[in-house]
């Protein structure tokens, strides 16, 4: 999994039918110092994350292992909202 | 998923039989400012996208989770045409 | 999928038994201007491609979705020989 | 698999229900000289690794092939604690 | 698949039980001129490769398609020992 900050949303009305009902979040990836890298991914939201929150997302086939995304053409899913993370006992982020 | 602009098409008459009937689009990937990165991917089109449109595509095994691509040797699929996307309330693209 | 030019071949007599009978092609990846990038991948050949031809290949589990590669430890397959591809109506390659 | 050093932990109380009970470790990836690259990944811990230990992790669908991670939306798992590794007979790391 | 040279070994006594009996090789990836790139991967050995040999490895779910690695948390496998490979008729490596 990677850490990312919810940066925005993507709206798409014309899509594969199996995607109906999914919310798509635009995530900016974070580096090991909790800074945005400029890289992004669009992920389905399985946990109700809001803009500005730090989240974890899973990619690939693992992204389909939620009730929300099962058997859908979706390759990234937000599967947790992060409370805090630390490196060597040093907090890099606390909600 | 990643965001991309439909840049062109790929024609291939000699191919694996399971690919018959698929349309292959050449997608230029977009960065977080909606600018082309110069990177591309060729994706099957599950939604009838046209050249110039901004789309989302899924990669890997998730690309086979449409009726169109099921059990085919296809690792990228356009699964949505984007209406708009925004970062921090600031529209980066509106159709 | 990505576009590549067939650059050479790889010979391996000692291999996993399930790979018997596969031909392995060395593919040089192409950029959006149809120039070689210097990057390569070794792919099984499902379509009888020849050296110098421009092809499309699929990666990951999708590479096993041909009769030729089914349930084999193979993560890249040439699944089409390209006739032509264009960007914005401008031919980048014609066979 | 890649080699990494356990650098820290990630705490997330609001998450996909199938993730309950998993411990998430922040791993810093190592280069061929056993130095940290600055790159990281968050992985579920299947072996009880501690901060500072050198571990191997598996990514993608393979990350779900432990009893601990089976059918969970998890794309990286620590599957071994490394005792030692060497290149050309030269120890790069010994626990 | 990618080409690599067997550079060393990784020893791990504490690991996921399904990994018992696997040998882990440290592979240095090769570029299109048969030179080491400095990049590496750790792969299970399905063919009995020795240090210094040039091999092919498969990644992702395809790495589990050998009898040796089936349903194990393993994302890279050496599936062939290379006898030779050439680019445009020019041998880049002969065993």
Image (spheres, coloured by chain):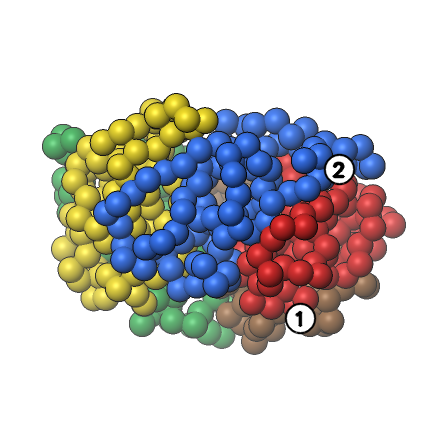
Chain colours: A yellow, B green, C brown, D blue, E red
> Between tags 1 and 2, which lies in front?
2
Q: Residue at image x 72%, y 32%? A: D92
Count neighbours of disc 1 (C-alpha within 10 A) and say few if under 14, some if 14 to 19, many if 20 or more: few
Using the rendered view, name the quadrant where residue A69 is placed: bottom left
Q: Residue at image x 58%, y 42%? A: D55
The percent position of residue D81, horizontal first and vertical second, equals 60, 45
Q: Residue furthest left?
A: B89
The percent position of residue C54, horizontal first and vertical second, equals 57, 53
Using the rendered view, name the quadrant where residue E36 is placed: top right
Image: C87 above or below A17? above
Q: Residue at image x 39%, y 51%? A: D22
* Front-lying residue, C16 or C92: C16
- Is C94 placed left or right of E33 in the picture? left
Count neighbours of disc 2 (C-alpha within 10 A) and say few if under 14, some if 14 to 19, many if 20 or more: many
Secondary element type, mark 1: loop
Chain under numbered label 1? E
Secondary element type, mark 2: strand
Q: Is residue E72 visible?
A: yes
Label 1 and label 2: CA atoms lie apart by 27 Å
Chain under numbered label 2? D
The percent position of residue A12, horizontal first and vertical second, equals 17, 51
Q: Quadrant of the C terminus of chain D?
A: top right
| Residue ID for mark 2 | D86
| Residue ID for mark 1 | E67
Image: E28 above or below D64? above
* Front-lying residue, D52 or A81: D52
* Marks 1 and 2 share the same chain: no
- Is A82 placed left or right of E81 in the picture? left
């Amino acid at each position: 999994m990677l850490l990312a900050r919810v940066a925005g949303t993507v709206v798409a009305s014309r899509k594969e039918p199996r995607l109906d009902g999914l919310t798509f979040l635009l995530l900016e990836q974070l580096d090991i110092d909790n800074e945005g890298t400029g890289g992004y991914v669009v992920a389905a939201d399985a946990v109700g994350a809001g803009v500005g929150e730090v989240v974890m997302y899973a990619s690939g086939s693992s992204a389909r292992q939620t009730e929300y995304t099962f058997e859908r053409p979706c390759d990234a899913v937000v599967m947790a909202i992060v409370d805090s993370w630390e490196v060597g006992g040093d907090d890099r982020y606390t909600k």
